[in-house]
Amino acid sequence: MFDTMTFTKLLGGFAGTFLIFLLGKWVAEEVYMVGGHGEHEQAYVIAVPESGEGGDAPVEEGPAFEEVYANADPAAGEGVFRNCRSCHSVEPGENMTGPTLFGVVGRAVDAVEGYAYSGALEEHADVWSPENLNAFLEDPRGFAPGTKMTYSGLRSVEDRANIIAWLDSLDG
């Protein structure tokens, strides 16, 4: 069915197609890039205004944390705690990568014995009030730049309120 000449034609067709794609890539790099190989700067830049002015729709805020926290479900907060379980314990005096969270609501920031805090938290809060915990859990590095906590944060205000209510219920 296939003889040597047919196989050679097929191989030549694939090789020719590959060379055409390589040539197209080279032409595209020359057109859209400045400086050739090694330097990859854009040949043109589209200016984008940084301000939110213009036809942008207003960003709708969700419900206030205080309203959500008043109706929080501690049982749902226990389920949300699975995100925290790898670094934190809820047993008194049991520190892991992060400090124990037993009694954290209302406790002074950096008050757990035997845990080496980074010092970044002291600059932003004195006590772990529900509001401070909410801000910290939303964006830990945004709330306290330099904190040792590497978690990116909980985006849902309901999840934050539920977990804070659950943590508050642990110490009675």
Image (tube, rainbow, N blue to C red):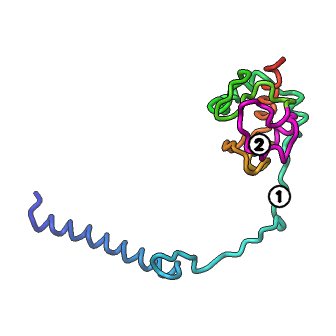
Q: Which residues are magenta?
A: 108-135
Depth check: give the residue in front, 25 or 110.
110
Residue type highlighted by circle 2? Glu
Can the viewer see residue 157 in this picture? yes
> Is 63 part of what is drawn in magenta?
no
Side of 57 where 154 appears, left or right: left
Residue at the spot of label 2: 138
Vertical placement of 2 versus 160: above or below? below
Name the residue furthest top: 172
Side of 142 where 69 appears, left or right: right
Image coordinates for residue 65, horizontal then vertical, percent: 87, 38
Disc number at residue 43?
none
Residue displayed at 84% across by 17% down: 172
Depth check: give the residue in front, 148 or 172.
148
Residue displayed at 82% across by 38% down: 134
Image coordinates for residue 122, horizontal then vertical, percent: 83, 44
**Prevailing SS of the magenta stretch:** loop
Side of 29 where 103 appears, left or right: right
Secondary structure at numbered mark 1:
loop
